[in-house]
Image: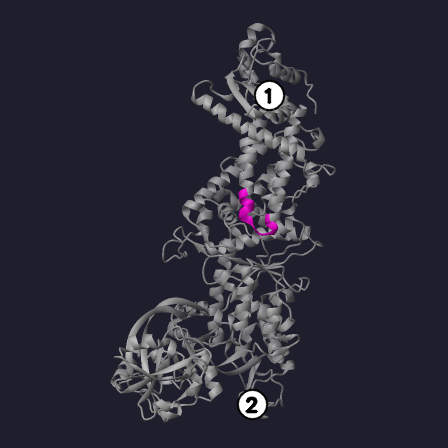
Amino acid sequence: MLPIMKKINHLEELKRVPLELKSTINLPKTDFPMKANLPQNEPKMLARWEEMGIYQRIREARAGEPMYVMHDGPPYTSGPIHLGTALNKCLKDFIVKSKSMAGFDSPYVPGFDCHGLPIEIKVDQALGGKKLQMKATDVRLECRKYAQKFLDLQTSQFKRIGVFGRWERPYSTMTPQYESVVLATFYAFLEKGFIYKGLRSVYWCIHDKTALAEAEVEYENDSSPAIWVKYALKDDPATVDAALKGKNVFTVIWTTTPWTLPASMAVAFHPHEQYVALEAGGEVYLVAAKLAEEFIKHAGLDAPREVARFAGEKLERKNFAHPFLDRNILGVLADYVTMDTGTGVVHTAPSHGADDFNTGVKYKLELTSNVDEAGIIRNGLPEYNGLKVFAANAPIIDLLKQRGALMHEDRIEHSYPHCWRCHNPIIFRATEQWFISMETPMDGGTLRSRALDEIKKVKWDPAWGEERISNMIATRPDWCISRQRIWGVPIAVFLCAGCGKPLNDPATSRKVVELFARAGADAWYTSEADGLVPTGTKCQKCSGAAFKKEMDILDVWFESGCSYLALRSAEPQYPPAADLYLEGGDQHRGWFHSSLLCVVGTQNHAPYKGVATVGWTLDENGQAMSKSRGNDVDPVDIAGRLGGEIVRLWVASVDFREDVVGSEQLMLRIAENYRKIRNTFRYILGNLDGFDPEQDLVLFEHMEPLDRYMLRETWAMSVDVRRWYDEFAFHKAYQRVLNFCVVDLSAFYFDVLKDRLYTSAPGSRGRRSGQNAVWRIGELLVRLLAPVLSFTCDEVWQQLPSLRHRPGSVHLSRFVDSGDLLGSRISPDDPLEREDWVTLRRFRDSVLKRLEEMRNQKVIGSGLEARLVVNASHNIYAVLKRHEADLRYLLLVSSVALTHAAGNTTEAVAIAVEKADGRKCDRCWNYSTHVGEDPVYPTVCERCSAVLKEIETGAAVR
């Protein structure tokens, strides 16, 4: 007999029963707090993970399992993390953790992009003029320090939001091992004949004084002058068309870059378009027929007369006069001349345009650029010589006016290429650069065709990514891989001092790679590299014996494109292709693109099996986030105030394939949803006090019907979530779990179950059935949510009932399978059971709505004051009859009278609410006509009387 029962010796002492009855209620008890205090408690969990070496422990636990490699795209180490990088890293963490818990060996080696212009510019600003007196190795050391500072900062910030990985040994593009692989990849291209050095017109940033790749160019709106300029025909006009004989003929070009006119060498016509000769004011103008009306309007011609019409091919190799220079201008043909705006005639400056350059090569035009690396025009007329290109626009326009060559002047707003690093407008400039040819033959085709073939084998998510990158590969020019900077991997090639031809000697190349692997790329700037050319080496072209070092560096996209090759060189057990690359949508022209070319060119296969694309982070007004606008949301700040878990849950809540919205208010709403999930765990843990899963086990087939149903519902939810994990549809998983916690558990199952858990004898079969179900649901949920709520789930893991051989962290466990949840012989689905419970829950919703109406009418207070009279038609009646004994508990009322509707009633079920008969039980608060029948416990109902006797005699069934 319990001590409290010994106090009840005679009827006079019954007044003490209410207090004692309260002590017999199985109220929830747990140390798991309702208030998470995430900002204070997460760092403690981080320290625990650090102490136990969680990442290495996971690797050891999954050793020998099938591998799943999610290869990290390196973030740039030029500043702290922002919401976009937090989104990126959390998504990768979700994938790696979910794969690991699904049984894969899923390593995650974080990467950092440490070379490149942004860092060098910051260091330049800090050093000022002192840089000019410093050795290259000293400047590179300052760049290295700068990059390392932010590498360390980003590492701490990513760890703060719960991202697991090999943080103590990431891959970094500035380590000797990585630099040596980059160089070895360059040599592989060189030895296979892909690489050449030549004069080409390339994107050029005059602010940063370097060539740019296509991936380093972004387009922004800009205002430019638009001018219509006439070029006089020098040849006999009759050779074009007899109707032009003896006339004063001009062609008219339209351009938005007046500064390129000093470099104008030709005028281009479309060979198959029709051109018209318009006569007005004693002059004849040759323009495209499709654009004639537009030209007439802009030029202000008065009643022009068409005197001839002919195809553009008639103007090939005709000679025109430059509008202000003593230079012959050749008529050329080009398919790229469009008919959408202008005049259909394009002035051609081979040194300042990719198409122009190719046309210049075809027609053997002068290709030399008179614009220097800073964008200053050299060797020009006094009016513009020594000016920066954009500053030269106005004086060149004035010069055209003076020479009578300007027919119209305007301004337009248009999309213009800018440097993605400094955001200044860029130009095309003909310079000697290193290129990878897209058309070099290789096994199976060319680099271009093989890359296109491999793209088709990759799973693109979203699917439009395939077409996007295919179009970019199909239309891209040769890859300009040289940069005129210092902070990067040098193009470690020895050039003949006489003729400039590169030394392509594999033995020498291997020595340089070994040097880089030992001493890093800095070694190229030391005398040690000078001695690597073997004595007696001769130039293959001119037999010269003197060599000099190339001092350009490689494009950083080439560096990052080598990342999986570098990782595999250090981890040879990794598969030839990673399972997944995941980065922003701009990487179809960036990292996805360069990685594809680097690996196809050297290994003849794609570096990835799947590619997922992440959208941009925007504010609530749809604007891109930036600190300068003041609309950014700092994930580190959110972690410090609300918790890293809130950042993670926000990431899980959005469909990353679209542009996603972040804001303070959104984070607060996410925090509220987090509390709902946390309270679900708290309910579970609170009702497992004193529960031993091994001693108190109840088999599925012996459980109460409601418990069996909810375990199957839990499994159905788990199947959905795990499928969405596999599809990276984390937002769907988030909504499914949140709905399950709020609707299925809190509002339904826990609401119904609490009566049985609280008022039954502690060891009764009914209560143990409920505890078994709650425990199993908790075990499944804590593992299922661990990839997302990594901190909270490990906190819950420590509070769940202990089991033998249980790992020390939830992250070392695996997802629960149906055998663990239900039993190996139990079907995960029972259609008849499910149909019954669909009917019961729909019926329950109707009852609760009716009870609410009665409460509002003051007929009843709580639902337990109600008695229901239910008149149901045949189909519903059969379901209710099967569960009749449990209906009052399911509906949270004191009694239910069920009758079968006679005849052809139009209502499926009629619900009448009456005041419950009898008195209120002081223990369970149900109303019963049997309250007072037990002389020992006169204030309790017959059910509680039996429970109290069971407690008193210690006869609870375990």
Against 311, is 645 above or below? above
Residue 227 vs residue 905, the one in the foreground: 905
The x, y position of residue 377, in whole percent, is 35, 82
Horizontal arrangement in the rendering, residue 452 relative to residue 266 (left or right): right
- Residue 725 is a magenta residue: yes
- Residue receiving disc 1: 903
- Report the span colored magenta: 724-735
**Residue at x-position 62% and y-position 46%:** 722
The x, y position of residue 30, in whole percent, is 57, 32
Q: Which secondary structure lies at badge 1?
A: loop
- Residue receiving disc 2: 546
Q: How many numbered marks does the figure carry?
A: 2
**Residue at x-position 66% and y-position 32%:** 833
**Residue at x-position 62% and y-position 27%:** 875
User: Would residue 432 be seen by someone viewing this image from the given angle?
Assistant: yes
Amino acid type indicated by mark 1:
Gly
Image coloring type: one colour
Residue 451 vs residue 849, the one in the foreground: 849
Q: Quadrant of the N terminus?
A: top right
Few, some or many C-alpha atoms within 10 Å of disc 1 (few <14, some 14-19, many ≥20)? Answer: few
